[in-house]
């Protein structure tokens, strides 16, 4: 997908300003945004890949000017309407409606810790044979993008399309976001840590000796 979120290595956006590492201290509204997103996700109407795709589909203007949690809330509002959980009128605060059909799925305070502890593991058994081993040289798919849905979600960044790298590690088999984000099933397949020389990814890297390691699904790769 060629959208504004996939900006790694692009020119013209200015220097990257690294943010402090570690767990950020959230303000009141950011904490509410996080809680609302998790509570809405517990309704079971979408998965994590669908929610990522919703944020990617924000207009470039909004994506560029919104902060991190503003993107979350904007993507969530779109998802709530697209899946029929709420209407635009609901988001505008209409009063006096009967109980919502999904009211029985509300995430109550006493259940939050259990939901958070459960997490969202994406490792799954798969019958897709493992094709590569550590040390193998591979090429990323060219052209890139989602191979299943035109313009769809993918975790292969644009700057790594057609690059040559080396398998570092097999992570096991995991849900394929390119399928799962579009309701096509989880389609689990092997995922690898792949090391690339900076000079493979960018024409004029600031530090040519740097190495970039990306976690990439098997269908993104072919033997080099």
Image (cartoon, rainbow, N blue to C red):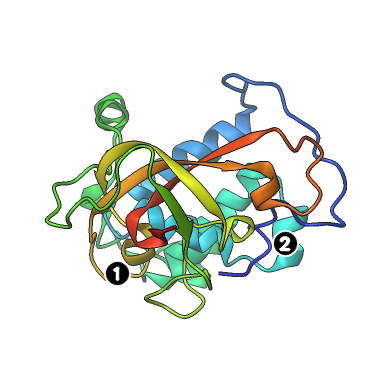
Q: Which residue is mark 2?
A: 62
Within-10-Å neighbours for mark 2: few <14, some 14–19, many 20+ = few
Can you identify the residue that label 1 sits on?
183
- Marks 1 and 2, the one that precedes in the sequence: 2
Question: Which quadrant of the view contains residue 2?
Answer: bottom right
Name the spot of residue 116 as percent of width and height, x first: 32, 29
Q: Can residue 120 be seen from the camera position used here?
A: no
Name the spot of residue 67 as percent of width and height, x first. Answer: 70, 45
Quadrant of the drawing holding the C terminus: bottom left
Q: Is 38 situated above or below 139?
A: above
- The x, y position of residue 47, in whole percent, is 33, 55
Q: Position of residue 178 (x, y in %)?
A: 38, 64
Whether residue 201 is visible, yes or no, is yes
Given residues 197 and 54, the one toward you in this image is: 197
Q: Foreground residue, 190 or 167? A: 167
Describe the element under mark 2 as helix, strand or loop. helix
Q: Which residue is at 34% across, 37% downward? A: 134
Above-or-below relation of 9 to 97: above
Q: CA distance from mark 1 to mark 2?
A: 26 Å
Helix, strand or loop under label 1: loop
Q: Quadrant of residue 19?
A: top right
Residue placed most toward the observer, 18 or 71: 18
Q: Point out the residue furthest to the bottom here.
A: 150
Name the residue: 29% across, 35% down.
Answer: 108
Q: Residue at x 70, y 22 (%)?
A: 20
């Amino acid at each position: 997908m060629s959208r504004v979120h996939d900006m790694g290595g692009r020119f013209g956006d200015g220097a990257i300003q690294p943010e402090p590492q570690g767990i950020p201290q959230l303000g009141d509204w950011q904490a509410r945004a996080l809680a609302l997103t998790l509570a809405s996700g517990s309704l079971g109407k979408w998965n994590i890949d669908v929610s990522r795709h919703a944020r990617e589909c924000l207009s470039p203007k909004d994506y560029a000017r919104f902060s991190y949690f503003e993107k979350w809330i904007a993507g969530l509002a779109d998802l709530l309407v697209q899946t029929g959980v709420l209407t635009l009128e609901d988001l505008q605060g209409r009063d006096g409606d009967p109980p919502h059909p999904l009211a029985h799925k509300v995430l109550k305070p006493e259940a939050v810790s259990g939901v958070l502890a459960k997490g969202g593991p994406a490792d799954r058994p798969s019958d897709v044979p493992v094709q590569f081993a550590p040390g193998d040289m591979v090429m990323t798919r060219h052209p890139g993008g989602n191979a299943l849905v035109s313009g769809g979600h993918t975790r292969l960044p644009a700057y790594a399309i057609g690059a040559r790298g080396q398998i570092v590690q097999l992570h096991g088999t995991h849900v394929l976001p390119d399928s799962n984000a579009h309701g096509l099933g989880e389609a689990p397949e092997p995922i690898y840590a792949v090391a690339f020389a900076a000079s493979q990814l960018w024409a004029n890297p600031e530090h040519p000796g740097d190495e970039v390691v990306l976690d990439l699904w098997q269908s993104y790769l072919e033997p080099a």
